[in-house]
Amino acid sequence: MSASTSTETIDAARREGLPSGSRLQSVRLANGLHVLAAEVPDARRLRLVGAVGAGYLDEPMAYRGLAHLLEHALFLGSGGFPGVSELSRWVGHLGGRYNASTGEATTDIHLHLPPEAAEEGLARLVDLLGRPLLLPERIAHEVGVLDAEYRARLADPALHRLAALGRLCRPGHPARACHAGNRDTLGQDPERLVSHLQDFHRRHYRPARMALVMLGPLPLEAQLELLTHHGHELGASAASPSPGASEAQVSRWGEPGGIAWCPPETIVGSPAATLELFWPLPGNLARAHAEWLDALVARLADGALAATLRSAFGLETLDVSLSTPGTGHALGIRLGFSELQPRHGDSPPLSTLLATCHVSLERALQQPMPPPPRATGDLDAWPRRQAQRVVSQARHHEAVDAMASRTALAAWLTPGQCRWLWHCPSQESLSDPAWEILEETGTHYRMLSSPDTTQVSALPPSPAPRIAFEPPPEAGSDTDVAGRLHHDKRLALWWGPLPWPDSEEPEASWCLGWPTESTGHRARLAQWQRHCLPLRQAAEAHGLTLLTGSDLRGDWLLASGEPGRLPSLVEQAAKYWLAARRDAPPGAVQPAEGLIAQRLLCELESCPAPRIPRPAPRTGIAEPVPTLLCWAGGSLDAETARQHAHRFADLLPNTPPPHATPPETGEWKTVWLTPQGADQAAMLEVAGHDDTPRSRFLLQLMAQCHDAAFQHAMRQRHGFGYVAAVRYREAAGGPRLGYVVQSPHASVETVRLAIEDFLQEQGVSLACLETTEFRQRLVRLAASQRRPESRLEGIQRTWHALRQRAAEGIDSGNAFWRPPPWEEEQSVLASLAASDLAALADALVLAGLPRRWWLHSPR
């Protein structure tokens, strides 16, 4: 029985960013648990999320890191599933994924599973949340894992950002302290620590403060039946009541002002400088006017502020958000710069930036708000976002006052209420006594008083890029059929609808790709994306999508949305590419931020693979590769496609650039990462034989076979640390595997030899599967590769399949996709045998596949 039920219409589901035909229903069970079911008929995977309205700000100060440790401890065995890492083995066997995160006020666990695993997945998730074993010996070991994670995060700017942010909080508030958790903050007494974990779980992990969310293809009624049945199992965990919601969000803050900060040593990968502005908001007002605030965010991110700042500074990123980490309810603006050197203290650039952002916010508040933007359909993020929203509301006792004045809310959005963080990677002036150091993290910081921005002129406003509307020309002959409309050395134009059910809206899409220099593609893409920042934001304000990319086949763009605005969008993006090609710096772009292991895995998606001999065309004689490849889809007629394609071709170079020949397959040169932090790390990168569906699927199967065993060997057997994984990536011209380990103490050579030993000892045996098990894995992989889950995914998969065919000289005549690319992939999967996987494992172990080592050692 449920205490209350709310059924959402299909229109509401679409407003929430779910695909057409989806249905939603939320229920609050008699035990207080909130459950939400989302039926998405085209979803390939089931998403399950369990969330709790408790986070690191709820911890006792004497045991900082307790909430994060409990998140880890949930996976160390539960009443019904007592084995250590039992969930990871079960999920890995199914070819699924899982993860968890602890925020300041919420903790969530999320699973991606085959739809048929819904019932067992729910049973395991509920048991994990409600009945953790919390055995002292396991907890003691996990404290060591948490400590290794903490040591690794000391090289991550995100940790130092949170540490510096705490300096803006009033003394005595828990947000002022670092809650990452390590051996020092959690103590040395396992029995006492377990007692505190049990108490924290008993007080906070109660049904009334929890939510279960399911998204998948199962009928709505079946999802609700499963959620209700298993949700009632959490009733047994309802013990003593929680002491109530933590202090009001706004009460955490001290006086308005700013912080300049930088890590204890320069962290590579950061922009030249970042500036974050945020305005704390009372929770009740923020919840009462959520849609109005969403519209305000859209107004600030419509491209005008980005264009204004780009006119004077090397603006790289501009993000506007209501969910900035560590700030609670707040409106936040984050600016990243590639060419801005902060001056000592309250420099003129800082004052100008603050004044410009304040003026932009004031103008936005004075203008009529546009309708809230339609939510984007990220099916992976949607269940987590919904679960966190529900439990965040559940932990607050005050009612949402729908009549609360927006004027009262706007009073919190003034320059006098603004706080800011100024990230200074350069340490040239750190010897100045004004800089202080946080003892626990080593973060450098200094307080900045609020500048008098009335004495500083804001930058003159620039308008957002104008995406003009062009009425379509007169329709051409209706005798044209989907296929290739034009082909010569200059232009190949394909035209036809997406081979997947389109939405009912009259949307269109343009995809363009052209060959480019094979060197410097990362720097060129980064520069192109910087130039396109205001345009991309303006496109989103019009409900359009603009994606840009670069790989070994060349550069490309994808534009989708209202057909009358797409030509203007595409032409402006192409002109920005010409400027980026001219302005791109000769060196490599900054590597990704974060843990060293994350930086290594990012390299799998960006560095070119060795050249693989191109296969002979299937028809014998290859047609010329055109300078520009176009695909026009959706509601565009053939004549309009012809006219616009020739306009686009006139914008781009008529001849392909000289193409440097990458090395042949074999051993790559070892790469050493720029030192960052104190950990050692190593990654073995392995590329597939070629860039075909066959190679891609076999490498994915290999990752499934190796990941859990590799993690156990590196973490349990060798005790290297908490980062050890096998990850599949697909980018830059080919499929890859990365065997990555990050360790706080073992030498790079020790880690490298351990990875080699693992492959020699278990690499082949783990991949030699019985026919039945192989077929089961193949079926699950096939299910995860079925037809697209959204229109945009369908466009992307079709477009890249078309690019691959063109690059390989595969001639399909004038016919469009019959069958669609995903149906071709299913036939490839059906043709694979267990012996194919075993043969690939042999090639991997015997170094018969292209490979390269990525290594990191501290200074």
Image: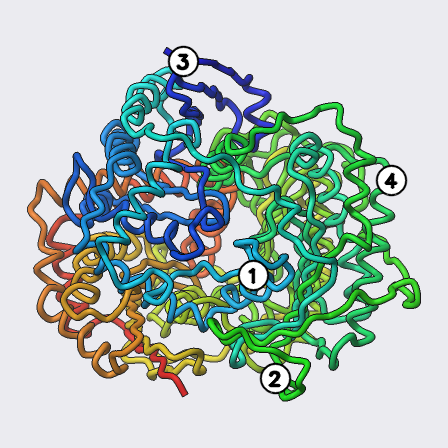
The residues tagged by marks 2 and 3 sit, at their Cα atoms, a distance apart of 59 Å
- The residue lying at 68 percent from left, 37 percent from top is 286
* 7, above or below 115, in the image: above
Task: List the residue tagged with mark 4.
Answer: 367
The residues tagged by marks 1 and 3 sit, at their Cα atoms, a distance apart of 62 Å
Q: Amino acid at mark 3?
A: Ser
Disc with the residue nearer the chain's start (2 vs 4): 4
- Residue 768 is tagged as none
Does residue 478 appear left or right of residue 437 in this picture?
A: right
Query: In the depicted view, which residue is nearer to us: 754 or 479?
Result: 754
Does residue 330 appear left or right of residue 752 in this picture?
A: right
Question: Under tag 2, what secondary structure?
Answer: loop
- Residue 2 is tagged as 3
The residues tagged by marks 3 and 4 sit, at their Cα atoms, a distance apart of 44 Å
Q: Position of residue 386 (x, y in %)?
A: 50, 34
Q: Amino acid at mark 4?
A: Gln
**Circle 2: is it few (<14), some (14-19), or many (20+) Cα within 10 Å?**
some
Residue 169 shows up from this direction: yes
Residue 489 shows up from this direction: no
Task: List the residue tagged with mark 1.
Answer: 626
The residues tagged by marks 1 and 4 sit, at their Cα atoms, a distance apart of 48 Å
Question: Under tag 1, what secondary structure?
Answer: loop
**Circle 3: is it few (<14), some (14-19), or many (20+) Cα within 10 Å?**
some
